[in-house]
C-alpha cells in the first residue's frame, strides 16, 4: 500500500513537470510568433476580425464627445502614428484634425501590429472604452508609457486621477 502511494505521488509529480514544460514550450512558441509578427516587413493586411461596419466616425467626434460613443462599436480611419514597440498590442491612429490621435488597444497576443505599420493608413473597428485610473494607477501608467517609448517622465506631472478614452480594437486593415 505504501509503495502504491509513493508510485502515485511520483506519477503526479511527473505529470506536473510535463505540463510545466509543455506550458513553457507553448509560451516560448507564442513569444516567437509575436516577435515574427512584430518584425513583419510589409504591414499590409487584415488583423483580427474582418471589418463589419461601413460608416466611419471621425476621430475628432470621439475625442470631442467620448461619452456618446462609450460602449459602441465604431469604425475609424487614419494613419498609424505609433505602434507598441514591445508586443504590437496597440497603435495610435491620427485624427482628422492636426495633432489628434486615438489609441487602439487589442488583447495581447490576439492581434500583433507590426512596427512597420507606422506611417501606413489604417481602418479600425472596435468599441470605445473608458478607463478610470486613480492617481496611483495614473502614475504607474504614465511611467510605463514613458519606459515603453524611451521618454523621460516627471512623476510630479501626475496630480490626480486620470480618465483614458481609447478604442478596444477587434479588427483592422492596414493599407500601404
Image: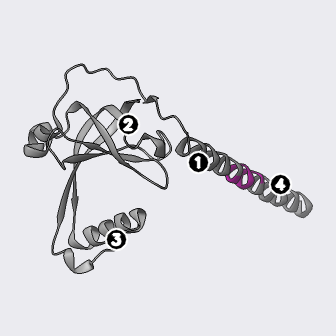
Q: Mark 3 and 4 residues: CB-CB less than 8 Å, in contact? A: no
Residue under pointer 4: 11
Residue 20 in the image, given as x and y percentages of width and height: 71, 55
Neighbour tally class for label 3: few under 14, some 14-19, many 20 plus, Cα within 10 Å = some
Mark 1 vs mark 2, foreground winner is: 2
Sequence-earlier tag: 3 or 1: 1
Q: Can you tell which quarter of the image residue 161 is in?
A: bottom left
Looking at the image, residue 175 lies above or below residue 82: above
Sequence-earlier tag: 2 or 4: 4
Residue 40 in the image, given as x and y percentages of width and height: 55, 40
Write the residue at 35% across / 67% down.
Answer: 146
Neighbour tally class for label 1: few under 14, some 14-19, many 20 plus, Cα within 10 Å = some
Using the image, tell me which numbered label, if any, was put on residue 143.
Answer: 3
Per the rendered image, the range of residues in magenta is 18-24
Residue under pointer 1: 35
Instruction: Kindly report the distance in space between the C-alpha atoms of the residues bearing marks 3 and 2.
Output: 28 Å
Write the residue at 81% across / 60% down.
Answer: 9
Q: Residue 113, can we see it? A: no
Query: Which element carries disc 3, helix, strand or loop?
Result: helix
Which residue is the extreme one toward the bottom?
Answer: 156
On whether residue 164 falls in the magenta region, the answer is no
The quadrant of the rendering that contains the N terminus is bottom right
Instruction: Kindly report the distance in space between the C-alpha atoms of the residues bearing marks 3 and 4.
Output: 46 Å
Please name whichever residue, 170 or 150, is drawn nearer the observer in this view of the structure: 150
Amino acid at each position: 500500500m505504501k509503495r502504491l502511494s509513493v508510485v502515485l505521488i511520483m506519477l503526479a509529480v511527473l505529470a506536473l513537470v510535463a505540463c510545466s514544460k509543455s506550458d513553457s514550450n507553448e509560451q516560448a512558441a507564442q513569444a516567437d510568433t509575436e516577435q515574427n509578427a512584430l518584425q513583419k516587413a510589409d504591414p499590409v493586411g487584415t488583423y483580427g476580425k474582418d471589418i463589419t461596419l461601413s460608416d466611419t466616425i471621425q476621430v475628432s467626434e470621439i475625442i470631442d464627445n467620448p461619452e456618446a460613443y462609450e460602449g459602441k462599436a465604431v469604425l475609424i480611419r487614419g494613419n498609424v502614428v505609433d505602434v507598441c514597440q514591445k508586443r504590437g498590442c496597440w497603435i495610435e491612429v491620427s485624427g482628422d484634425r492636426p495633432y489628434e490621435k486615438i489609441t487602439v488597444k487589442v488583447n495581447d497576443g490576439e492581434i500583433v501590429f507590426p512596427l512597420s505599420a507606422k506611417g501606413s493608413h489604417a481602418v479600425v473597428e472596435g468599441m470605445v472604452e473608458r478607463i478610470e485610473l486613480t492617481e496611483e494607477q495614473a502614475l504607474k501608467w504614465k511611467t510605463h508609457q514613458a519606459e515603453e517609448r524611451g521618454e523621460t517622465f516627471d512623476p510630479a506631472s501626475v496630480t490626480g486621477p486620470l480618465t483614458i478614452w481609447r478604442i478596444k480594437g477587434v479588427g483592422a486593415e492596414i493599407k500601404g
